[in-house]
Image: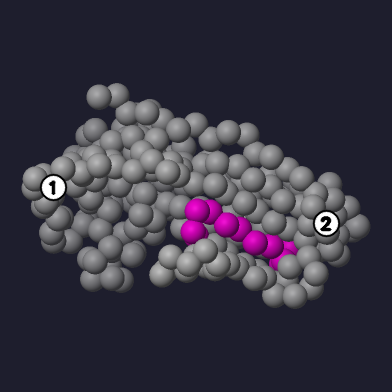
Amino acid sequence: MAAEVAMAPPSAMRIEGDEVIGTSRSMASSIKVRVPLSAASSRLGGLGAELSTALVGRALEVFVDVERACSRFDPASPLSIANADPHSWHQGSAILLDALSAARTAHRLTDHRFDPRVLDAMIALGYTNAIRFEEGKSVTVAETMPAPVPPSGRWRPRVLPRLGRFHLGGERVDLGGIGKGLAVRWSADRLRRHCQDFLIEAGGDCYCSGSSADGTTWRVAVEDPFGADEP
């Protein structure tokens, strides 16, 4: 079955109160970036509204770039091409190489508990296209389906950033477990070069920096794990 690819819609911008809010959809998640106008205007010579909007747009672009490089649902993505031949060397963008390096580090630091070699298991469980991850759409797994065999041993990819080349170590990988978190981190790095006050929210992954538009600390609602309506 051909994999469906969820294309990210264009971002939407608005000024609400004293902040710029940008929203988009990427990596099967709703993305929101908020930057108080006062935060940017104090650092950018009084051009808060115009430049804040540009900064928010650039922060949202990170998610599109990460999805384009690291998606396993797009057969034309560099990761999908490498997964089709994991025993060979491949060319990759800086984003993909950085993501693979971060996954390799997480694999080592967690004593292999974090392991991106779960692609075959994910497919066996029915996660075959990006649309299944959309809100309100779940995957039905037959109770009689045998449990996928988890990966074992050490994952040994090779990444050569200066040459733009990488090798998956002979095993297919899925970077979905780390990609969105990295996108949040890299988006925050991009914003931090120009302002200290901002919030990035990406489907449960959240990064808060500095203060909100009213000068107080950011307040984040967390869903009640016991099912109550109020956070």
Direction front: furthest residue:
228
Question: Magenta stretch?
Answer: 193-205
Residue 26 % position (x, y)? 51, 42
The label on residue 143 is 1
In-front residue for pair 114/222: 222
In the structure shown, which secondary structural element does the residue marked by tag 2 occupy? loop
* Residue 177: x %, y % from top left: 35, 54
The foreground one among 39 and 172 is: 39
Q: How is the image coloured?
A: one colour
The Cα–Cα distance between marks 2 and 1, rounded to whole angstroms, is 50 Å
Residue 124 sits in which quadrant? top left
Q: Quarter of the image holding residue 230?
A: bottom right
**Residue 42 shown left or right of residue 69 in the figure:** right
Categorize mark 2 by other alpha carbons within 10 Å: few (<14), some (14-19), many (20+).
few
Examine the rendered structure and indicate whether residue 107 appears above or below residue 148.
below
Residue drawn at 13 percent across, 61 percent down: 153
> Looking at the rendering, which quadrant does residue 122 occupy?
top left
Q: Is residue 203 magenta?
A: yes
Name the residue at 60% across, 42% down: 24
Closer to us: 55 or 130 = 130
CA neighbours of label 1 inside 10 A, class few (<14), some (14 to 19), many (20+)? few
The question of residue 133 being in magenta is answered with no
Q: Which residue is mark 2?
A: 17
Number of marks drawn: 2
Helix, strand or loop at mark 1? loop
Question: Looking at the picture, which amino acid does disc 2 mark?
Answer: Gly
Answer yes or no: is residue 120 visible. Answer: no
- Label placed on residue 211: none
| Mark sitting earlier along the chain (2/1) | 2
Point out the image quarter for the C terminus.
bottom right
Image quarter where the N terminus lies is top left
